[in-house]
Image: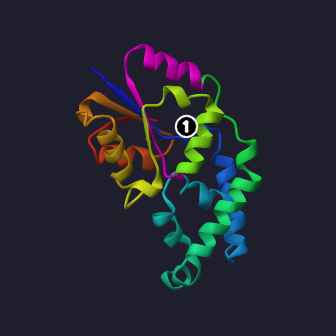
Amino acid sequence: MVKAVIFDIDGTIIDSVGAHIDAWKRTFAHFGKQVSDEEIRRHIGEGSDDMLPVFFSAAELHCFRPELERYRGELFKREYLPSLKAFPKVRELFERIKYDGKKIALASTAQAEEINIYKEMAGISDLVDCSVCAEEVAESKPHGDICGAALRKLGKLSPAKVISIGDTKYDAEAAARNNVCTIG
């Protein structure tokens, strides 16, 4: 019997994929790379620790990675975050899960500050038992760190009693590394 559900956020409960693609595209252009929407889309959901080396050399990242990540973060918060919306019926879904006696975790490559904004945006702050963000783990999705941390925060539930819900292969890969079944 399922005892908990782990949700990804971006693209799963918040309609944000297009905004992330555009913010990355503009950031890459600012740092000299012309990248198509489709090239970026293939990496949405993957942490920047794995995504950036696909588009930039190690030497480039050594020179300007912190500046690039800061630029992208500020751009996203300033120009995209204020206009994002939760998908319809997210609160109702979470209420039903809680009514059924299950725990809810959020597990995202987003920063903690963004996760708190997303919880408010979706109206689910009072329904979430725990969340895990990029700052809490050594490696982000598709590595298993975020899902593993969510399992621990949920009370070390057996992976067989947890379902992970996400919108990308990176969510499924992270869950699989922890033997958690996925809906995507």
Which residue corresponds to the image point at 69% horizontal and 50% vertical from the top-left?
A: 19
**Is 106 within the magenta?**
yes
Front residue of 109 and 183: 109
Q: Pinpoint residue 80: horizontal percent, then vertical percent.
A: 73, 50
Which residue corresponds to the image point at 66% horizontal and 55% vertical from the top-left?
A: 21
Front residue of 106 and 48: 106
Label 1 Cα crowd, 10 Å radius (few <14 / some 14-19 / many 20+): some
Residue 35 shows in this picture: no
Image-quadrant location for residue 86: top right
Which residue corresponds to the image point at 65% horizontal and 39% vertical from the top-left?
A: 15
Q: Secondary structure at mark 1?
A: loop
Identify the magenta region: 90-111
Seen as rendered, the residue at the extreme top is: 99
Left-right relation of 92 to 47: right
Front residue of 119 and 175: 119
In the picture shown, does residue 12 fall above or below 93? below
Q: Amino acid at mark 1?
A: Thr
Q: Pinpoint residue 164: horizontal percent, then vertical percent.
A: 39, 35
In the picture shown, does residue 175 fall above or below 42? above
Q: Pinpoint residue 61: horizontal percent, then vertical percent.
A: 53, 79
The residue tagged 1 is 12
Front residue of 80 and 51: 80
Residue 132 shows in this picture: yes
In the picture shown, does residue 136 fall above or below 9? below
Which residue corresponds to the image point at 36% horizontal and 42% vertical from the top-left?
A: 150
Left-right relation of 27 to 160: right
Q: Pinpoint residue 55: horizontal percent, then vertical percent.
A: 56, 72
**Is 39 within the magenta?**
no
Left-right relation of 176 to 73: left
Q: How many numbered marks are there?
A: 1
Quadrant (top left, top right, bottom left, bottom right) of the N terminus:
top left
